[in-house]
Structure formats: structure tokens, C-alpha cells
Image (cartoon, grey):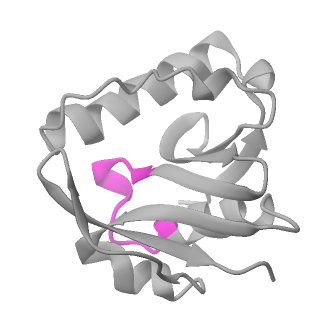
Amino acid sequence: MTPRTLVVPFTDLSATDVYAVARLRQQVFVVEQECPYPDLDGRDLEPGTRHVLLLDDSALVGYARVLDDGDLWRIGRVLLDVPARGQGLADVVMRAALESCLGRDVVLDAQAPLARWYATFGFAPDGPEFLEDGIPHVPMRRPVA
């Protein structure tokens, strides 16, 4: 697999891209992790939001969302399709997301088992663990580089 990343605002996504993103986010978070939540929260459309797509040929195999929260960046919705896992491709998605986060601290809410992985990118715990949809999460922050 020779993946390529694309980091774009919503307006640069095609209808096919939007469908693939929504489908993959639903498959991973709602179906696989059994977390029925309102994924389409309106933030995808914000002008400062960036969508990180990991593509294998034209197939979407990974994704992350970068939100512009004014004084900081927020990364979320980090995921890989099942066949893409175990190949180090999540690192590719995170590096691409972080490259779009210039000049400000970056925060995220890590699923607790993934906190060590996020630490490899410079994130550190930034508050107490909490439950979201029955899954333990750790708020994490990466100071501006």
C-alpha cells in the first residue's frame, strides 16, 4: 500500500469524499465501537476545519478532523478502516493532522488505551480521565512547537 494524504477544508471535498468520510466514521465509531452519537455535529462545515484523508488509490482508509478552536487546535475522529490497521498508517494520519496545526497548542480526547500512542507525538495528559459513550478518555495537550 502506498497511501497518500489529503488535508482540505469541507468545501474541497467531493460528494463522494463526504460520503466515504461519513460512512467510515459511522462504521468505526457507531457500529464497531457501539457508540451511537451525533457524528454530524456541524463542525465539519466550519471554515477553519481541516479534513485529513488517508487514501489508498481512491479508497478512504484513514481519517482525522482538525478543528480551529480559536486559541488552540483540536484533533478528533482519528480512525483507520479495519484492513489498514497494524501497518503504522495511523502515524501517517496523525503527522498530516499535526502539520496543519501551526502556531497553537493542540488538544484531543484520547481513548485511554491510546494515550501512550498519542504521547509519541508530544501529547501529555491535561486533566482527569472521563467516560464518553462508556469509553474511558484522557484529555491531552501538545504545546505549540
| Magenta region, residue range | 78-90
The residue sitting at the top extreme is: 15
Report whether 34 appears left or right of 80: left
Quarter occupied by residue 87: bottom left
Q: Is residue 83 above or below residue 125?
A: above
Q: Residue at x 80, y 24 (%)?
A: 12
Q: Residue at x 50, y 51 (%)?
A: 76
Is residue 74 one of those drawn in magenta?
no
The residue sitting at the right extreme is: 103
Q: Residue at x 44, y 24 (%)?
A: 22
| 33 and 58: which is toward the camera | 33
| 83 and 120: which is toward the camera | 120
Q: Residue at x 48, y 23 (%)?
A: 41
Report x, y in % for residue 27.
27, 33
| 142 and 11: which is toward the camera | 142
Report x, y in % for residue 131.
19, 57
Is residue 80 one of those drawn in magenta?
yes
Q: Is residue 56 above or below residue 136?
A: above
Report whether 97 appears left or right of 79: right
Quarter occupied by residue 25: top left
Q: Quadrant of the C terminus?
A: bottom right
Count numbered badges in the picture: 0
Report whether 120 appears left or right of 115: right
Quarter occupied by residue 39: top left
Report whether 103 appears left or right of 20: right
